[in-house]
């Protein structure tokens, strides 16, 4: 899955939402979230993010690695 990390916090540009073919990017209180159960790993969202907040899960820089769990937990309550 792809993950939306810290640069999105309090920004929520949402350019990614229009690119996602399966509409799996959702708005949260402070950032956008990718539902890991719905993401098809197409990568379309990554290059359109103006602040480069989107990473493939395994490619997250070390300082942003925690965001994989942040996105997963956002949907865990469903
Ligand atoms: Fe949507 Fe593709 Fe981005 Fe996954 S990688 S969130 S399916 S645009």
Image (cartoon, grey):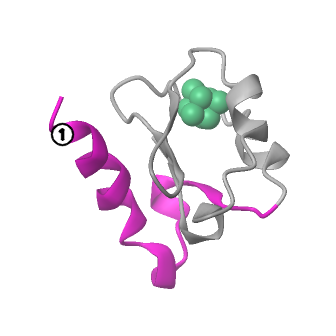
Residue at 56% over, 15% down = 22
Identify whether 7 is placed above or below 68.
Answer: below
Task: Find ligand 1 in the image and state its quadrant.
Answer: top right
Q: Is residue 69 left or right of residue 55?
A: left
Image coordinates of residue 2 in percent, x first then y, are 52, 45
> Magenta stretch containing residue 60, yes or no?
yes
Q: Quadrant of residue 18?
A: top right
Residue 11 appears in view: yes
In this view, the residue in front, 14 or 4, is 14
* Image quarter in which the N terminus is found: top left
The segment highlighted magenta reads 51-78
- Give the residue drawn at x 79%, y 39%: 15
Considering only vertical position in the picture, is 12 above or below 5? Answer: above
Tell which of 1 and 12 is nearer to you.
12
- Return the x and y of residue 49 as percentages of the image width and height: 78, 51
Toward the bottom, the furthest residue is 63
* Depth order, front residue of 53/42: 53
Residue 62 is left or right of residue 69, and the answer is right
Q: Which residue does the numbered mark 1 point to in the structure image?
A: 76
Q: Position of residue 28 (x, y in %)?
A: 45, 45
- Tally of marks: 1
Q: Is residue 19 above or below residue 53?
A: above
In the figure, 32 relative to 23: above or below?
A: below
Q: Tell me if I can see residue 42 in this picture.
A: no
Q: Secondary structure at mark 1?
A: helix
Category of crowding for the residue at label 1, using alpha-carbon neighbours closer than 10 angstroms: few (below 14), some (14–19), many (at least 20): few
The answer to whether residue 53 is magenta is: yes
- What residue is rendered at 65% in x and 69% in y? 7
* Residue name at image x 68 percent, y 30 percent: 17
Q: Quadrant of the C terminus?
A: top left
* Left or right, 13 with reference to 3: right
């Amino acid at each position: 899955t792809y993950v939306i990390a810290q640069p999105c916090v309090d920004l929520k540009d949402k350019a990614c939402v229009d690119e996602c073919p399966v509409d799996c990017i959702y708005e949260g209180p402070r950032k956008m979230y990718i539902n890991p159960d719905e993401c098809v790993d197409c990568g379309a969202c990554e290059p359109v993010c103006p602040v480069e907040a989107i990473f493939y899960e395994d490619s997250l820089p070390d300082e942003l690695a925690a965001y994989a769990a942040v996105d997963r937990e956002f949907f865990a309550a469903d």
